[in-house]
Image (cartoon, rainbow, N blue to C red):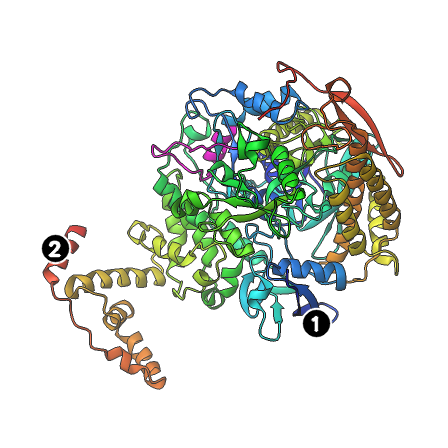
């Protein structure tokens, strides 16, 4: 197999020396995973290099880090695929989490988010006592398994802008976990879960960063959208966010009913009100994007057909 | 040093440890789960294919638990304790029910019942699964269930140094917090070792980097015996060249092994079961094919899934597909997956009885791959490791509860300071041996000399070389003197554990002059029931392994030739 020498630049950190970069030359071939690169550096060159790694097959979620600036699992990343034309690769600790040592950040805040969403099934008493068998349709299993696929790697939270801006937002992974139990008909705490997750779900900006970086294709943002669809079942306090959410939902219904489509500027106006809209118009004016607020947007042609369908929905 | 007191301390946050933690905590006792990784990083997560279970009303109509036990006994080449195998089969259905009640998302049949499929060595299909990430799904289910208990404390990223004991009584253990390097004494009346396997002993392994035989090492140093350590399983389908596991599910769902002539060579070695013969047989057959020049360049064979169809592969074998694609650049829907055998599982382990209790010390228990209950004998069948972790994790949890009810606290902790001081020596020393050098040598020796084919010469050489490495390891030192996540020190501790258990594996293999299951001796190619139908019991002496033997428990099945 053809081997090449590559250069790995690692952003190291320890309490005494602070942050510094160190470069290593390592032999690799087209099958060499970044976890293997790190193992070679550690056993053969720099035993002090610290990183997390366990399964080397992308199911344990240990080796999360930034590789050339992109939140990635080291084991799922092949050295040859990410090196630049000079054969160089940059490794850094994940964003958002506190640095502790080299490529090992403190991810406790990630775990705390997961623990907040009651991440466990509360089955019927009869089932727990073994008196009754649980059934589950294959389609339902598929839906649950999709969001159960989260491996606690923490990459989505490190990449999420809403987490950084809004401390009341639980973050993508916790929402995937939370929704996984809403989707599971074996669970007995559905209402409680909806009440717990709803306010946070509407704090997501739908930027899709979590969707991009998730190594398991869990698609947390989709779990958030699916959670939002339970808004009518929400019985918790009417927070500002919930009020906004209800307006938003009603606005969408109205718009589709009246025009057959979602008109973004009208939707905005109906959701946030005239005052907010003025404020944002000024911002848009400043940034030269005001023209998008006035894009011509016609109604769909067969609006009566749509009204019929919407009538059924109501 | 900080001291914390619990009723039970559990070393290991994988399936066996967490199952026991759930049981002991349900009985109202306080539990500490100590692991060098966050629990979901445990190697249980890497189990792919499934968990074998006989479920009444949801199994093949011709199947029953006796067939299942028979399969285990025969699969293990009759070195199985038959009472242990019968218990494993009898409780398999209950275990799946418990996991289902705790939320495990098993694949389903159209009517909503749990689905099942064939696995190697099974007379009837019994394997229950969650796609091909069954271990991960079950591990998360158990961990998340355990986080619901107020009386379970998790010590995540704590490395365990050694067992604290007073005479024959266990009194907890000493661990070091990896983040701060602070030692902590976790005192308890009952101690469960559920620290998993030892794959990193071998140059080629499907195991996680963390599988460094820590549980065996600390047990041996405390005077606890390992049972049957010569039995190491090599999985037929490690992905070439990264040794990532391609699940047996791939063959169970219809995948076929082929050599460079395109032949389905398993027809020659196992004319009835073909590719689904037990793992020891398939791995040996593959090694012979490669050795005799019928492998592909680089030393591998092909696993052909192409005839299964894209949709089926994506639904049932998505992990195998992804792994082949990501790590070997092969599209399994169109080409064969390159595979070769790699170390996979350790049938041996801490010597425990059917209740999970060890009798060398009072209050010490073991479960999962760390233990040897003797359900796997000389070769484990696929889908039985997950089953064992859970069935015996539960049985052992019950035994711990009984023990705690009848045993009072032992005060005193005479060896706590010694344990910490010995550990600090690695950091204080300014020169000596580096762990990486010792480790690379060890992994080569184990692969070359204590691997799939063994003989007297190779094994004697291994025992000699490992003894030398152990002598050199006394002078291990670390260059890193910092006090946050000093992973170099932990690698040195791991190396110490690996060397101790490697000596046990190679010594026991040298002693057993027969071929049985995964232990194949070129110089003794036949099973010898007259002389060797017995378990090895191995203790660590000063510089050698002390070996004795004890009988196998038979209940109903007499040894027969093992034909598949």
Q: Quadrant of the N terminus of chain A?
A: bottom right
Task: State whether residue B12 is above or below residue B425.
Answer: above
Residue position marked by numbered label 1 in the rendering? A22
The chain letter for the residue carrying disc 2 is: A
| Magenta residue span | B94-119
**Horizontal and vertical percent position of residue B387:** 56, 32
Q: Earlier in the sequence, mark 1 or mark 2?
A: 1
Is B224 left, or right, of B323 in this rendering?
Answer: right
**Horizontal and vertical percent position of residue A116:** 49, 51
Relative to the observer, which residue lies in front, A170 or B482?
B482
**Horizontal and vertical percent position of residue B150:** 57, 41
Relative to the observer, which residue lies in front, B102 or B211?
B211
Question: For the residue carrying disc 2, how many other residues have a C-alpha within 10 Å: few (<14), some (14-19), or many (20+)?
Answer: few
Is B10 left, or right, of B468 in this rendering?
Answer: left
SS at mark 2? helix
Q: Residue at x 67, y 16 (%)?
A: B554
Verify whether residue B74 appears in magenta. no
Question: For the residue carrying disc 1, how many other residues have a C-alpha within 10 Å: few (<14), some (14-19), or many (20+)?
Answer: few
């Amino acid at each position: 197999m053809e081997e090449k020498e590559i250069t790995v630049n690692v952003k190291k950190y320890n309490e005494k020396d602070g942050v510094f970069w160190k470069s290593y030359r390592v032999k690799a071939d087209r099958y060499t995973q970044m976890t293997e690169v790190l193992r070679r550096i550690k056993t053969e060159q720099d035993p002090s290099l610290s990183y997390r790694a366990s399964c080397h097959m992308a199911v344990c979620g240990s080796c999360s880090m930034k590789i050339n600036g992109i939140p990635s699992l080291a084991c799922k990343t092949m050295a040859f695929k990410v090196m630049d034309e000079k054969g160089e690769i940059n490794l850094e600790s994940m964003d958002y989490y506190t640095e502790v040592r080299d490529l090992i950040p403190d991810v406790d805040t990630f775990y705390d988010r997961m623990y907040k969403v009651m991440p466990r099934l509360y089955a019927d008493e009869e089932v727990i006592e073994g008196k009754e068998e649980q059934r589950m349709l294959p389609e339902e299993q598929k839906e649950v398994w999709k969001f159960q696929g989260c491996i606690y790697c923490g990459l989505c939270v490190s990449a999420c802008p809403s987490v950084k801006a809004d401390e009341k937002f639980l973050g993508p992974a916790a929402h995937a976990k939370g929704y996984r139990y809403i989707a599971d008909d074996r669970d007995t705490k559905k209402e409680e879960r909806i009440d717990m997750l709803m306010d946070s779900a509407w704090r997501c900006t739908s930027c899709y960063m979590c969707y991009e970086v998730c190594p398991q294709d869990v698609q947390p943002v989709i779990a958030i959208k699916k959670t939002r669809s339970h808004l009518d079942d929400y019985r918790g306090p009417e927070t500002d966010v919930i009020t906004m959410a209800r307006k938003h939902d009603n606005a969408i219904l109205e718009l589709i009913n009246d025009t057959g489509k979602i008109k973004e500027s009208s939707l905005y106006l109906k959701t946030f009100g005239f005052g907010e809209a003025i404020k944002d118009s000024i911002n848009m004016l400043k940034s030269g994007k005001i023209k998008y607020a006035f894009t011509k947007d016609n109604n769909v042609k067969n609006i009566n057909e749509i009204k019929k369908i919407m009538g059924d929905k109501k | 040093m900080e001291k914390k007191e619990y009723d039970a301390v559990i070393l290991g946050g994988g399936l066996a440890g967490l199952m026991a933690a759930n049981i002991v905590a349900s009985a109202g006792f306080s539990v500490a789960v100590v692991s060098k990784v966050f629990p979901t990083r445990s190697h249980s997560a890497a189990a792919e294919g499934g968990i074998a279970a006989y479920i009444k009303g949801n199994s093949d109509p011709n199947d029953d638990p006796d067939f299942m036990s028979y399969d285990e006994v025969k699969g293990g080449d009759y070195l199985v304790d038959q009472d242990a195998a019968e218990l494993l089969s009898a409780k398999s259905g209950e275990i799946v029910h418990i996991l289902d009640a705790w939320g495990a998302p098993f694949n389903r049949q159209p009517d909503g019942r749990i689905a099942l499929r064939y696995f190697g060595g099974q007379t009837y299909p019994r394997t229950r699964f969650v796609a091909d990430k069954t271990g991960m799904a079950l591990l998360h289910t158990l961990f998340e269930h355990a986080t619901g208990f107020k009386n379970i404390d998790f010590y995540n990223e704590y490395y365990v140094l050694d067992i604290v004991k007073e005479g024959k009584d266990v009194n907890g253990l000493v661990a070091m917090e990896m983040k701060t390097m602070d030692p902590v004494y976790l005192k308890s009346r009952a101690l469960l070792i559920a620290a998993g396997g030892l794959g990193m002993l071998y140059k080629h392994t499907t195991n996680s980097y963390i599988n460094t035989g820590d549980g065996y090492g600390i047990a041996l140093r405390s005077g606890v015996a390992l049972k049957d350590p010569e039995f190491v399983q090599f999985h037929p389908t490690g992905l070439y060249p990264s040794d990532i596991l391609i699940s047996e599910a791939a063959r169970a769902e219809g995948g076929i092994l082929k050599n460079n002539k395109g032949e389905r060579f398993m027809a020659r070695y196992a004319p009835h079961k073909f590719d689904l013969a037990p793992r020891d047989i398939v791995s040996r057959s593959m090694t012979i094919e490669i050795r005799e020049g019928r492998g592909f360049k680089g030393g591998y064979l092909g696993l052909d899934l192409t005839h299964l169809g894209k949709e089926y592969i994506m639904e049932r074998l998505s992990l195998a597909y992804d792994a082949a694609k990501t790590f070997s650049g092969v599209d399994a829907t169109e080409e064969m997956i390159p595979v070769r055998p790699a170390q996979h599982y350790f049938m041996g382990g801490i010597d425990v009885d059917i209740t999970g209790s060890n009798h060398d010390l009072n209050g010490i228990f073991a479960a999962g791959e760390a233990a040897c209950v003797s359900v796997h004998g000389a070769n484990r069948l696929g889908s039985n490791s997950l089953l064992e972790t859970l069935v015996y994790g539960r049985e052992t949890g019950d035994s711990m509860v009984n023990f705690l009810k009848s045993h009072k606290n032992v005060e005193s902790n005479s060896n706590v300071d010694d344990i910490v001081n010995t550990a600090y020596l690695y950091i204080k020393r300014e020169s000596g041996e580096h762990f990486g050098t010792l480790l690379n040598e060890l992994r080569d020796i184990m692969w070359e000399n204590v691997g799939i084919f063994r003989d007297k010469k190779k094994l004697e050489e291994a025992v000699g070389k490992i003894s030398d490495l152990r002598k050199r390891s006394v002078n291990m030192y670390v260059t890193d003197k910092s006090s946050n996540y000093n992973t170099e020190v932990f690698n040195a501790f791991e190396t110490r554990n690996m060397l101790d258990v490697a000596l046990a594996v190679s010594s026991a293999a040298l002693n057993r002059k027969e071929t049985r299951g995964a232990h194949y001796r070129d110089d003794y190619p036949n099973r010898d029931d007259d002389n060797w139908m017995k378990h090895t019991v191995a203790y660590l002496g000063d510089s050698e392994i002390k070996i004795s033997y004890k009988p196998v428990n038979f209940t109903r099945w007499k040894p027969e030739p093992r034909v598949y």
